[in-house]
Image (cartoon, rainbow, N blue to C red):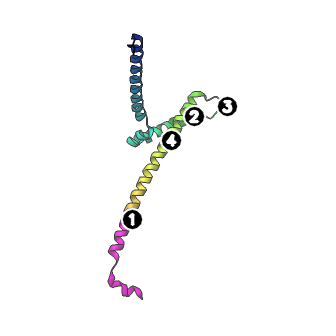
Amino acid sequence: MEPRSDPDRQIEDARASLVEHIGELGRRFKVARARLDISAQIAARPLLAVGAALALGALLGLRGGSRREREPGEGGLGSAVMAGLAALAVRAAKELAMRGATEAARHWWEQHQQASASEARTSYDPHMEPFLRH
């Protein structure tokens, strides 16, 4: 077996360095994706998300509120970006509202079921059976 030459060692060192940098980029990407997770951000700050959606909707409503007709294609890239952001904000607000409504309904249902079960147990009186048969 022949000893490794200097260029071979340099290639191996460069490869190891590249693998290390790719690993670091992967870790940074995971952190950035977690920070940009819209659903998690909305769940963490629901009132802020609803307020942002409301403000964005009002801004778009005021901006697009002119009475003159627009020519096709006049809106441009800025309008498309704003419309996309507005759609995302409305969708996020809708998802948040539906999640909250679902949780509230589930909580109400569980309480209602527990109350019904305990009411049925406490309202039964065996002495009333002969009266109820007539």
129 vs 28: above or below: below
Q: Which mark is residue 113?
A: 1
Mark 4 nearby-residue class (10 Å; few <14, some 14–19, many ≥20): some
Does 83 sit left or right of 52 as displayed? right
Determine the CA span between mark 1 and mark 2: 49 Å
Q: Which of marks 2 and 4 is in front?
A: 4
Determine the CA span between mark 3 and mark 4: 25 Å
Residue shown at the point (39%, 16%) measured from the top left? 1
Labels 3 and 4 touching (C-beta < 8 A): no
Label 1 element class = helix
Which quadrant is the C terminus positioned in?
Answer: bottom left
Does 85 sit left or right of 134 as displayed? right
Residue for badge 2: 64
Task: Name the image quarter holding residue 4.
Answer: top left
Q: Which of marks 1 and 2 is in front?
A: 1
The outermost residue toward the front is 1
Residue for badge 3: 72
- Rendered location of residue 42, percent (x, y): 42, 41
Q: Nearer the viewer, mark 4 or mark 1?
A: 1
Determine the CA span between mark 4 and mark 1: 34 Å
- Rendered location of residue 87, percent (x, y): 53, 39
Labels 1 and 2 touching (C-beta < 8 A): no
Residue for badge 4: 90
Q: Nearer the viewer, residue 22 or 80?
A: 22
Magenta stretch, residue numbers = 111-134
Does 3 sit left or right of 81 as displayed? left
